[in-house]
Amino acid sequence: MDRNVVGMILGGLVNVAIALLLAPFFQGVLRRVTARIQSRQGPPLMQPYFDIFKLLGKEDIESGETPGMQRVATYLLLATVLAAVCLIPLGFPAPFSGSGDVILLVYLITFSGICTLLAGAAAGSTYSLVGTSREMMMMIALDPIFAITLVIGALHVKSLRLDAVLNGSVYSSGFPAAGLIMLVVMLLAFQAYVGRVPFDISEAETEIMEGPLIEYSGPKLAMFKYAQAVKLVVYAALFVALFVPWGNTFPLPLAFIFFWVKVLVLVLLSTFLAATHARYRIDQALKYYATFLAVSLGAVVLASFGH
Amino acid sequence: MSILSKLMEAQVCLEAGRVTMPYPFQPRTPPTTFRGRPIFDGKKCIGCAGCANNCPAREILVFDPCQEIRVLKYLGRRCTYCGRCADLCPEKAITMSGEFENGTNAIGDISQTIELFMSTCQRCGRCFDEPTEGKRNPLEKLKMKGYRFDDLKNERWIFRSQAYLEGQPVVDDIAIDLKD
Amino acid sequence: MVARDRLNQLKEKFGPAILRSDLPNDRRLHVYIDPASVKAVCQYVFRDLDARYVISIGMDDRPFSGKFLVQHHFAFDADKVLCSLIFPVAKDNPKIDSITSVVPAANWAEREIRDMFGVEPVGHVFPKRLILSDGWPDGVHPLRKDVPWNHVPENFDPEREFKFEEPPEGCTVVPFGPFHPTLDEPCHFRLFVEGEYVRGCEYRGFMAHRGIEKLSETVLGYNDIPVMAERICGICGCVHSLAFCSATEAAAGIQLPPRASFIRTIMLEMERLHSHLLWVGLACHIVGFDTLFMQAWRIREPLMWLCEKITGNRKTYGLGIIGGVRWDITDELKGEVRALLNSIESQWIPVVKAVVGDKNIQARTSGVGICDKALCKEMGMVGPMARAGGVDIDCRRDHPYASYEQVDFNVIVEQSGDVWGRVLVRAKEVFESIKIVRQCLDKMEPGPLVADIKDELPVGRMGMISIEAPRGESHHTVLTGESNRPRRWRVRAPTYQNLQGVPAMIKDQQLADMTISLGSIDPCFSCTDRLETIDIRSGEKKVYSRAQLLELVRAKKA
């Protein structure tokens, strides 16, 4: 029993370490590819690491309404996202899968969104409140879609255990109708989850000056940026685990590399979409997601009938 | 068809390739006609003060300490690199160089002073040949009428538009302190 | 109908009120009218004769005629006539009826006359201070002849605050500016927002007012003003410099040599090219589409290099002097210009094709910032704003200057009136500009670059010119004066009128559309809250509050 617990804790730390190490790398790839599409040179691949170190060393100016809550929100956000990381298979089985389950994952993802809302509300400036309200609307539209995907997977494998669900479970044994529908829906909604153009509405830089992040500087901003980078890794890994699971039965080094190659392809696809689109308005985005929600509900019904 | 137009846009981007220049890691020379910092050649200067009278930014001061000595000082603080001084100089003593990296916190790096010993013609008494009607630069025709009485010590450009008349306006320059 | 016909119309209607008239040529009309009938005359000209309002100007003519002059300028675009209605106002307790109730576009111009000259517009709908800073004492009017240019008034009150209007019921206040990532220059729109919808706004601007017109009357001469005029704007500097030169040449009766005229046309069109390419990129950046922003600027960059080669600088060309131009376009440069135009055209065509079919950009710009024909007429809006709303005006065709009468081009008009229409107008005007430059290069003959000015310029003559800047009509008025400097120079940039239409444009729109609506007029306007200083030697930190900072920058250095 003790060995199990120690093993889980070590495994969790390994997951967290991998996520923390690789998240800025993917940001760097993202920035460099975007720059090449824009005919520019782009920053070096290590730039996000430098940025985070630079921000950590800067002075922390606490200029929002309730600095105490701002601190809590920042640390809580990073903590939640890293906790979610421990539940996800990153090329090898997740360390906490024995004790976690699907509902805990949904809860953690939603809670990280709530931390962003807390951060915006705690800052209290006009623009951050506008950004917070937009973020809230986006969350209401998006989190159900994610939950529905996991529910479909759970319906198919008849279990709520993470290691069963996060294994391509959305594709049922018969004609994988619900799975394919959810694949398309999640692909189209992926940009919104990771907060990139065309759906980075809550943080529209040119319109509302960074939204919820407006009163954050120095170390707090570093943690926010880090949390956003880790979120990209989390969602990409979840997507790959749910929809593109082939190859995770290979022996360990190969499966690990294969997994991260798949994540990289997804990140490149997201970058390409971000570089070639303009930002949508909140009402246009909500109309877009309302249709997705309706389609997802249809998919759940199909899944409950065994498809 | 939105996807088609996105692909067309993507094609435009990828055809262009990378266009960023590695300046400042590699120098970038401007074209020969570039108007950079003006360089004054004291050997060619005849002291006509055409440059001083036509500088829009009032950055060239002229002062005669005595009858035979003329001091011309280019300050360079507010120089806009318009190049009129170079256009007007009858001896082509001013060149607009290609230097554009002129940032400095020591004004002495940029300001240039010319001190001339003005000898007069024994017949007509003039120091230099004033260009006649046909050869005069067009800018000279519309220059302000009056005379200069600059304060070199305090670096002030002072223009008196009507000499010796009581109550006539004296147009002063803004005094800018370079030390704080 | 030429200017004389318009004068006859006015004489017929207002006979005894007309004091004097000047007809320099078929296209210009100056009428001196009794100030008691200012409202009736302006109503007749604006509504019955359907003229376009241009600007209102104040002049301090007390040293010469003993009166203030208030001028209202109108344009008859179809007839190519610019007319100036001049109303002499008595110098003691000067006041004149406000025409803003009749001509809504005169709102800011009359407030400016009030701030700068002290001529009170009686019956103005919103007589609040516009130009002068908050602490400036009442009663000191800078553009009057008896106020020196470097005058610091004694009763300057640094504590006096700007009194904002109250927001309407149920609205919160969202401050837009003076500092905002989208804006290049400071301006303050105080938005009254209900949920996500903007219900109204209050504008406060003129934070970068530099007193250029006062300097031109006092310290600078005819030679120096073109160089300063170029620095009024960082994008359309050439327009202002050449507009001043053209207005003075019109006033003094100087004829431009043909080659100089063609070169001016070429450089003005090159400026329009660079400005429109810049704007299309900027509009894409505002809606979050950075890739197209980079591509538009990439296409624009060789144009800046060529201008640097021709004139010596990327943007401040230094081109204009009274009577001609300073730089020549040699045959070798001609070849380079042609090659560049071919390259820009061939690169811009696929971009326009891609943008026109792009639903994603259209979703953000269609139906946003609507400015229809009626609003354009009421607020006197000009340029691509008006042309996108279906109003067919273009100073290059309506009030020709330089060599525009010798080239053929189309005026691009769209009917939609929204931001998308403005994007299309500007994108297509790029091709028209390329056409004009090619024609000029073909038609240019060798010749002198500067006109031979025999005497001093005549004194007391008025010249008006309307030049089509990339943003719209830029209208300059020059009254020539003694000692080689003008008596009065009034610059009316196109954004002056376009900005007055913005509150109506953004009403009942979403907050997210605010930036793109404001960006679509291509605003060219030109403040810090806290400043922290660290003494390097002692390591001591001091944070300046707003009041202390103001005191610091205003302290006179001995």
Image (tube, rainbow, N blue to C red):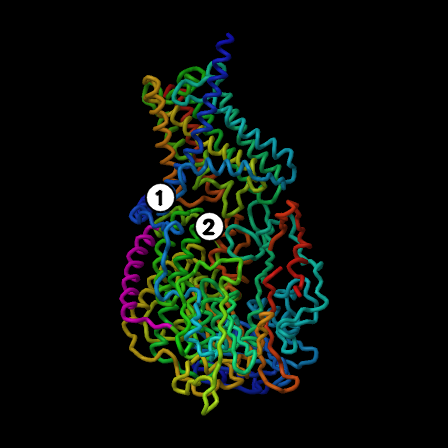
Tell me the quarter of the picture where residue C438 sits.
bottom left
- Whether pointer 1 and pointer 2 mark residues with C-beta atoms closer than 8 Å, the reply is no
Q: Position of residue A7 (x, y in %)?
A: 47, 13
Tell me the quarter of the picture where residue C490 sits.
bottom right
Look at the image and tell me in which quarter the C terminus of chain C lies: bottom right
Quick one: A301 or C510, which is closer to the camera? C510
Q: Position of residue C252 (x, y in %)?
A: 47, 83
Instruction: Answer yes or no: is residue C111 visible.
Output: yes
Residue drawn where x is 31% and y is 44% of the image: B7
Discs 1 and 2 lie in a common subunit: no
Q: Position of residue C227 (x, y in %)?
A: 47, 71
Q: Chain of mark 1?
A: A
Q: What residue is pinned by disc 1?
A: A36
> On residue C77, which mark appears?
none
Taking the image as shown, residue A30 lies to the left or right of residue A110, namely left
Q: Chain of mark 2?
A: C
Which amino acid does the dot numbered 1 rest on?
Arg
Q: Secondary structure at mark 2?
A: helix
- The crowding category of the residue bearing disc 1, from other C-alpha atoms within 10 Å (few below 14, some 14 to 19, many at least 20), is some
Q: Which residues are drawn in magenta?
A: C327-354
| Number of the front mark, 1 or 2 | 1
Which amino acid does the dot numbered 2 rest on?
Ile
Tell me the quarter of the picture where residue A159 sits.
top left
Taking the view exactly as shown, the residue that stands out farthest to the bottom is B123
Quick one: A219 or C100, which is closer to the camera? A219
Q: Secondary structure at mark 1?
A: helix
C339 falls in the magenta region: yes
What's the distance in space between the residues labelled 1 and 2, CA to CA? Answer: 21 Å
Quick one: C236 or B135, which is closer to the camera? B135
> On residue C286, which mark appears?
2
Taking the view exactly as shown, the residue that stands out farthest to the right is C155
Residue drawn where x is 42% and y is 76% of the image: B89
